[in-house]
Amino acid sequence: MQQEVFDFHKIDRLDWCDFIESDENRNALLYLTKWPNWNSCGMIIYGEPGTGKTHLAALWAQTANAVYVLKESLNHNPRDLFEAKCNFVFDNFDDMIKYENYDWFFHFFNIVKEENRFFLILSRVHPSLWGIKLSDLRSRLFTLSAVGIDAPQDDLLLKISQKIAKDLQITVPDDVMMYILNTVERNVSSITDVLRILDKLSLQKKKTLSLSFIKSNLKL
């Protein structure tokens, strides 16, 4: 009889002690930790998915008492956000700005400065690629510090993968993890999906995640 496998959700550990500092993300981390002594009221972090932007934003949100601004908020007066004494995070800003709600962001920017608040923008691409047509908004956003995070190299990717396994509560030997990294697409989403699949298979077949088991079951 095949063992039933429950789909446990990944437990994201987004504390300071769980963040993996590296050459790829050090500039963003250093600038973020300077808050509130930034040189402006906002900061932009950009980089490909899986580079750690979300983790950094969560850490800053804890420190700065910041809330995430949802896309639905763009349908309301931006001043409504300032009723609470908090700062703000915009995740996937490049998706939000494509709807060309330029006036909303322009007014938000002005209110932030008026209220002495702060905000953090996360984007997959450099701000120059946002294509903002409102010159007043574009000039204001370009006064913000924009720090990129590079795609993780081998050492960092291994550490990130080990953290993913830990979050998934999976024990993966180093040789197995290196084989996975050299076999699958090298991004966090793909690695997470593969680890989930292999963990289910190992539970179903009552086998450990050995190298021989991975080689015989990792079908790409």
Image: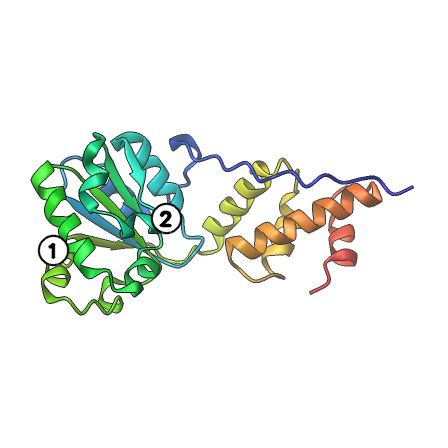
Residue 21 located left or right of residue 185? left
Amino acid, disc 1: Thr
Residue 139 located left or right of residue 7? left
Q: Nearer the viewer, residue 29 or 92?
A: 92
Residue 60: assigned label: none
Q: Is residue 99 visible?
A: yes
Q: Could you tell me residue 148's position as x and y percent? A: 29, 56
Mark 1 in CB contact with mark 2 (< 8 angstroms): no
Residue 209 located left or right of residue 189? right
Amino acid, disc 2: Lys
Task: Give the quarter of the figure containing the C terminus.
Answer: bottom right
Q: Which secondary structure, mark 1?
A: loop
Q: Is residue 106 above or below residue 33?
A: below
Q: Could you tell me residue 140's position as x and y percent? A: 11, 56
Q: Which secondary structure, mark 2?
A: helix
Q: Is residue 39 visible?
A: no
Task: Give the quarter of the figure containing the N terminus.
Answer: top right
Residue at the spot 39% in from the left edge and 42% down from the top edge: 55
Quadrant of the image occupied by residue 171: top right
Q: Which residue is mark 1?
A: 143
Quadrant of the image occupied by residue 99: bottom left
Residue 53: assigned label: 2
Residue at the spot 73% in from the left edge and 51% down from the top edge: 211
Mark 1 or mark 2: which comes first in sequence? 2
Q: Is residue 213 above or below residue 7?
A: below
Q: Could you tell me residue 21's position as x and y percent? A: 37, 42
Q: Is residue 147 above or below residue 174?
A: below
The residue at the far front in this view is: 76
Disc 1 and disc 2: Cα gap in Å?
A: 20 Å
Numbered circles on residues, count:
2
